[in-house]
Amino acid sequence: MLILGIETSCDETAAAVVADGRVVLSSVVATQFELHAQYGGVVPEIAARRHLENILPVIQGALDQANISLNDLDGIAVTQRPGLIGALIIGMAAAKALSFTLQKPLVGVHHLQAHIMAAFLLETVPAFPFVALVVSGGHTNLYRVNGATEMALLGRSRDDAAGEAFDKVAKLMALGYPGGVRIEALAQDGNASTYNLPRPRVHGEPLTFSFSGLKTAVAGRLKQHPEILTDAGARCDLAAGFQAAVVDSLTSRAWLAMEQEDCSRLVVCGGVAANSRLRQVLQAHARSAGLDLFLPPPSLCTDNAAMVAALGYRLLMAGERLDLTGDVFSRG
Ligand code: KG4
Ligand code: ZN
C-alpha cells in the first residue's frame, strides 16, 4: 500500500510516500526558517502563504523521488491537528483535492501521534506497550502508548515546551531563529558545568516538566553578566549549561516513567530529539541499563511527512476515513 503523507502544521511544507507504513520511498521537506528568521519566530500568515506556494511542487517532488505517479497511490494522509490553522488548511485543501479527483481514501492524522509513528519507520520497530517522549516546539509530553492511537498521557510541561525553551533562550542569547540547532552548535564547544542552572521540578508531580524557570535563570545570568554575549567561550558554556539542564530534565523523567509503567521500551521523537547531546545521553543510558531505545534519525524527528504517512497507513487499514467536510483544528 502506497500512502502519500502531507504535513503543513507549522513552518515546514512536507510530503512523503511510504510503503505499507514501514518503508520510506521519498520524503521531501521545504523549510521556511529563513523566511521567519528576521521576525525571530514563525509568523502564521507568512507560513500559510509559503505553504500555498510550496505544496504542489513538494508533493510532485515526493512522487518523483519515489518514482511513482498519482494513480499509483492507495491513500492520502494529512495532518489535521494540532497546528497553525492557516498552515493546516493548505495541506488539508491539497489532500482533499487529490482524494476527490483520484477517488482515493483520505485520513486526517494527529501531529504528535505521527511523531511517535516515526519509530515505526526504523528497521526494528517497538512492540506495544512502550513509553514515548514527544519533544517538539509546542509540546513536551510523556505517554504510555498501547496502540497506534491509544495513548495515555503520563506527564507534560506545565509551561514552555522543551523546543520552545531552546528557541527562547536562543533569542535571549541573540542567536536567532531557529534556536535549537544554534544552541546545539555553540554547546559543542562549551563546558556544561561553568554555569550551574536549575532543573525545575513540580512538587508532587514527578513526571511534570517545567522549563520557564530555566529560561528565567538564563535571562538572569545574562542580565547580571551581559559580557557573556560578547565572550565566545562564555557563550558556549552558557549554551552547554542550558542544553545539559534540558537534557537532564527530559531523560530523568523518561527513565522514571519507564520505571513507573514497568516498561523497558522507550521512543523519543519530535524536533528536540534531533539534538545530538540528548541522543548521546539516551543511547548511553539505554545501553548501560539494558533498555530498548527507539530513536528515529534526526530527519524523521523534525517535522516531516513520512511520519504522517506511517500513521495514516495504520488508520486507513483500521477503516478510518475523512470526508470532504473534514476540518482542521489548532488544538490537539
Ligand atoms: O517537531 P518539530 O520539528 O516541530 C514542531 O512540531 O514543533 O520541533 C521543532 C522544535 C523547535 O523548537 C526547534 O528549536 C527544536 O525542535 N529543535 C532542536 C534541534 N532541532 C530542532 N532543539 C534542540 N536541538 C536540535 N538539534
Ligand atoms: Zn512536530
Image (cartoon, rainbow, N blue to C red):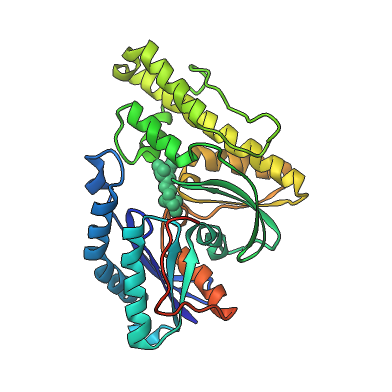
Asked whether 91 or 14 is in front, the reply is 91
Quadrant assignment, res 12: bottom left
Residue 67 visible, this angle: no
Residue at horizontal 37 percent and vertical 19 percent from the top:
233
Residue 126: x and y in percent read: 65, 61
Asked whether 138 or 330 is in front, the reply is 330
Asked whether 228 or 171 is in front, the reply is 171
Residue 111 falls left or right of residue 226: right
Residue at horizontal 54 percent and vertical 60 percent from the top:
113
Tell me: residue 306, above or below residue 161.
Answer: below
In the orientation shown, which residue stands out farthest toward the right?
A: 262
Tell me: residue 124, above or below residue 313.
Answer: above
Quadrant assignment, res 97: bottom left
Residue 312: x and y in percent read: 50, 72
Tell me: residue 323, above or below residue 278.
Answer: below
Residue 186 falls left or right of residue 272: left
Residue 280 falls left or right of residue 228: right
Residue 326 visible, this angle: yes
Tell me: residue 38, above or below residue 133.
Answer: above
**Number of numbered callouts drawn:** 0
Residue 98: x and y in percent read: 34, 80
Residue 223: x and y in percent read: 37, 15
In the orientation shown, which residue stands out farthest toward the top?
A: 224
